[in-house]
Amino acid sequence: MGAELVRRGFSIISGNASGADQAWVRGGNDVDPAKVKLCLPWRSFEAQAIHPGNVVAVLDELQSSEKVSYFHLAAKYHPAWDQLMLGARKLHARNAMIVEPAQELVGYVDHSRPGGGGAGMAFRLADGHFGIRSWDVSK
């Protein structure tokens, strides 16, 4: 699917998590790695899966005001934000980085996890804050 989207002129923005995220990325990288942007919570996150041609943005390396706005959005849309440790908060704030520049969101929500996991957070941000059309391919 990632390869087909890039062939059709789309770019992929991903959090580079193992599983579906990296599958989309591998497909996009097979066509044009420069059309794949990875939004990472910290520099070493899933580093083995990063292609040298990918565009990489790292939450920990953003300007302070930008980072705070991503954390604020994640806190607003996560049902149990106060219960999360810093690493988990960074993973969810990274989802705001992924969704913000998107025109459409395509992803797989794991409905067996509370809130749908990280993808569930991305869909809540897309629908609730950014007004982006979203496609949950798990349905």
Image (cartoon, rainbow, N blue to C red):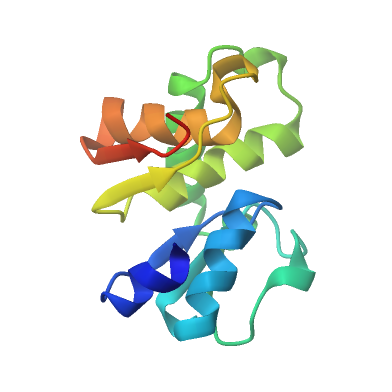
Tell me the residue at 26%/76% (across/down): 9
Query: In front: 122, or 139?
Result: 139
Q: In which quarter of the image is the N terminus?
A: bottom left
Q: Which residue is drawn at 44% across and 51% down?
A: 98
Q: x%, y% of residue 107?
A: 45, 43
Quarter of the figure that contains the C terminus = top left
Describe residue 23's horizontal placement relative to residue 99 as left or right.
right
Picture layout, residue 138 above or below residue 49? above
Above or below for 13 versus 74:
below
Residue in front for this viewpoint, 99 or 57: 99
Looking at the image, residue 32 lies above or below residue 26: below
Q: Please give the name of the residue rendered at 61% of the width and 12% of the height, measured from the top-left corner.
A: 80
Q: Where is residue 114 in the image (x, y as percent from the top left)?
A: 62, 15
Number of dots carrying numbers:
0
Q: Residue 4's x, y, as percent?
A: 38, 70
Residue at figure coordinates x 68%, y 50% from the top left:
19
Q: Nearer the viewer, residue 114 or 129?
A: 114
Residue 71 sits above or below residue 111 on the image: below
The spot of residue 77 in percent (x, y) is 44, 21
Quarter where residue 42 is shown: bottom right
